[in-house]
Image (cartoon, rainbow, N blue to C red):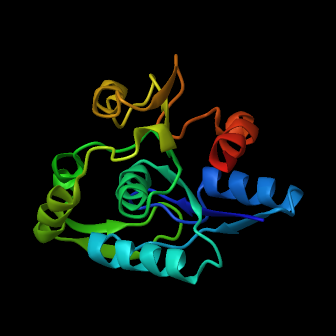
């Protein structure tokens, strides 16, 4: 049985399109055990939840992280030596997310959260270059309207990288890539 921890992005949830596609895929493959926790905007709380998921798993899981979830997946992969697929991962999120200070609403649930300046200092302190590049696969769509894919392409240059022309921040080709993603994670 393969245990997969799916990590959603900033202001997202287990209700996101990719999380739903991942859950549907896992239902069709009984050898996959999937965890998709709901994460708060506070990075310390989010990482604590993710560490609890890893600790509670009967075996070390593999990771799939999207956007800010890709940033978290890289941190966890470095800490625990895990394999991970990063989908349009956030690079330097302390800079990217600074425009979101104040009350923000989750895209799926509508629940309000307070984004605080101290969150960005923590994100900056957590940033780590890939420690085990052969265990990371970075999937980028050049049409990402939220993140400049070239930043991730440069930051993760030591890793396996797949850049698709077009697309968007949602990574439109996710469902089609799931068999290859699971195969990479099972190696």
Any part of residue 136 in sight: no
Tell me what residue is drawn at x 48 percent, y 49 percent. Answer: 66
Given residues 106 and 25, the one toward you in this image is: 25
Compared to 159, does 23 lie above or below?
below
Q: Is residue 48 above or below residue 98?
A: below
Q: Is residue 1 left or right of residue 3?
A: right
Q: Quadrant of residue 159?
A: top left
Identified at 33% across, 69% down, the residue is: 41
**Which of 160/107 is in front?**
160
**Residue 70 placed where, x, y %?**
42, 50
In the picture as drawn, the residue positioned furthest to the top comes out as 165
Residue 5, given in percent of the width and then of the height, sits at: 58, 64
Q: Relative to 1, is 169 on the left or the right?
A: left
Residue in the image at 63% along x and 57% along y:
19
Please, is residue 19 above or below residue 56 in the view? above
Which quadrant would residue 147 be assigned to in this image?
Answer: top left
Q: Quadrant of the N terminus?
A: bottom right
Name the residue nearer the viewer: 98 or 126: 126
- Quadrant for the C terminus in the image: top right
Relative image position of residue 186 (x, y in whole percent): 69, 49
* Residue 79 visible in the snapshot: yes
What is the count of numbered marks? 0
Q: To which quarter of the image does residue 173 belong?
A: top right
Please give left or right for residue 60 compared with residue 72 in the image.
Answer: right
């Amino acid at each position: 049985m393969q245990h997969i921890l799916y990590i959603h992005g900033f202001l997202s949830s287990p209700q996101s399109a990719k999380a739903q596609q991942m859950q549907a895929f896992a239902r069709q493959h009984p050898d996959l055990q999937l965890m998709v926790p709901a994460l708060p905007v506070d990075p310390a709380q989010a990482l604590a939840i993710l560490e609890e998921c890893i600790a509670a798993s009967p075996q070390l899981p593999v990771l799939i992280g999207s956007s800010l979830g890709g940033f978290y997946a890289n941190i966890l992969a470095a800490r625990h030596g895990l394999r991970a697929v990063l989908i349009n991962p956030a690079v330097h999120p302390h800079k990217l997310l600074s425009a979101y200070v104040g009350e923000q609403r989750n895209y799926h649930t509508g629940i309000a959260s307070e984004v605080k300046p101290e969150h960005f200092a923590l994100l900056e302190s957590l940033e780590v270059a890939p420690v085990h590049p052969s265990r990371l696969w970075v999937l980028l769509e050049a049409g990402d309207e939220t993140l400049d894919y070239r930043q991730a392409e440069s930051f993760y240059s030591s890793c396996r990288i797949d850049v698709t022309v077009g697309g968007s921040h949602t990574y439109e080709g996710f469902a089609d890539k799931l068999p290859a993603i699971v195969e990479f994670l099972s190696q």
